[in-house]
């Protein structure tokens, strides 16, 4: 039987970004292959893990889904410690969530480990007709801050596994 505890390296990843950008669904798609139409705002933090093979090694990705809502901020900071990687998410249909990426970068600098590797994720790429943030602008911001970048859709299962693989490979 496949044993989830049989891994070579443990990597802790945190997922941050404004409330409603789709962090919980990103993690659910990655860890459980599911999508939630009516997912509720995350309270504090939740964590999931999944083993994934990177360059011949089994990596146990321990993914911490943090609440985007301001009222939970003090709780979530405590979970930044020890994280090797972070995904900063914005919603391609919400301009403000993209503008707030700068704020999330600062929060990670203030509360995360100094060698934290970050990746920028533009979520809900299936909602092309409602897009307000151009893919070039996402790529440009990522470049400016030396982050990897992908647009994902948890609904269509597009680029989700690829995004986690990219981040884990960068950490490895
Ligand atoms: P907080 O827990 O409050 O920080 O929110 P969150 O970032 O975890 O957002 P969540 O995953 O709960 O998703 C918010 C809403 O966006 C839900 O109604 C989801 O169904 C929807 N959603 C998430 N991902 C996608 C996606 O890839 N495509 C579409 N169309 N909707 C999505």
Image (spheres, rainbow, N blue to C red):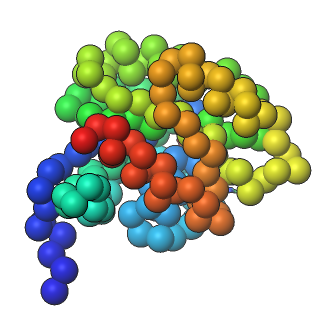
Name above or below for residue 22 compared with residue 145: below
**Front residue (pair 165, 16):** 165
Residue 117 spot, x, y in % from top left: 35, 29
Q: Residue furthest right?
A: 129
The quarter of the picture where the N terminus appears is bottom left
The quarter of the picture where the C terminus appears is top left
**Front residue (pair 71, 88):** 88
Task: Answer with left or right where residue 160 lies relative to residue 108.
Answer: right
Name above or below for residue 129 compared with residue 108: below
Residue sitting at 23 percent across and 28 percent down? 81
Q: Residue furthest bottom?
A: 1
Q: Quadrant of residue 100?
A: top right
Residue 79 spot, x, y in % from top left: 28, 34
Residue sitting at 33 percent across and 45 percent down? 169
Residue 137 spot, x, y in % from top left: 72, 27
Task: Answer with left or right where residue 154 lies relative to residue 147.
Answer: right
Q: Quadrant of residue 106?
A: top left
Residue sitting at 17 percent across and 49 percent down? 10
Residue sitting at 52 percent across and 47 percent down? 23
State how many labels appear.
0
Q: Is there any visible trace of residue 55 in the rendered image?
A: yes
Q: Is there any visible trace of residue 79 in the rendered image?
A: no
**Front residue (pair 121, 15):** 121
Residue 152 spot, x, y in % from top left: 61, 51
Task: Answer with left or right where residue 91 lies relative to residue 114.
Answer: right
Task: Answer with left or right where residue 43 lies relative to residue 116.
Answer: right
């Amino acid at each position: 039987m496949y044993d989830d505890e049989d891994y070579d390296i443990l990597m802790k990843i945190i997922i941050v970004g404004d409330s409603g950008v789709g962090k919980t669904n990103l993690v659910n798609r990655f860890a459980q292959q599911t999508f939630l139409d009516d997912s509720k705002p995350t309270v504090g933090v939740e964590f999931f893990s999944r083993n994934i093979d990177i360059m011949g090694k089994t990596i146990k990705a321990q993914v911490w889904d943090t609440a985007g809502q301001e009222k939970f901020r003090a709780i979530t900071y405590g979970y930044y410690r020890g994280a090797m990687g972070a995904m900063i998410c914005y919603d391609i249909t919400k301009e403000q969530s993209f503008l707030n990426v700068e704020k999330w970068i600062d929060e990670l600098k203030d509360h995360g480990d100094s060698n934290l590797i970050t990746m920028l994720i533009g979520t809900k790429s299936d909602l092309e007709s409602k897009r307000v943030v151009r893919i070039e602008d996402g790529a440009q911001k990522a470049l400016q801050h030396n982050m990897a970048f992908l647009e994902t859709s948890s609904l269509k299962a597009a680029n989700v596994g690829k995004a986690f693989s990219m981040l884990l490979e960068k950490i490895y």
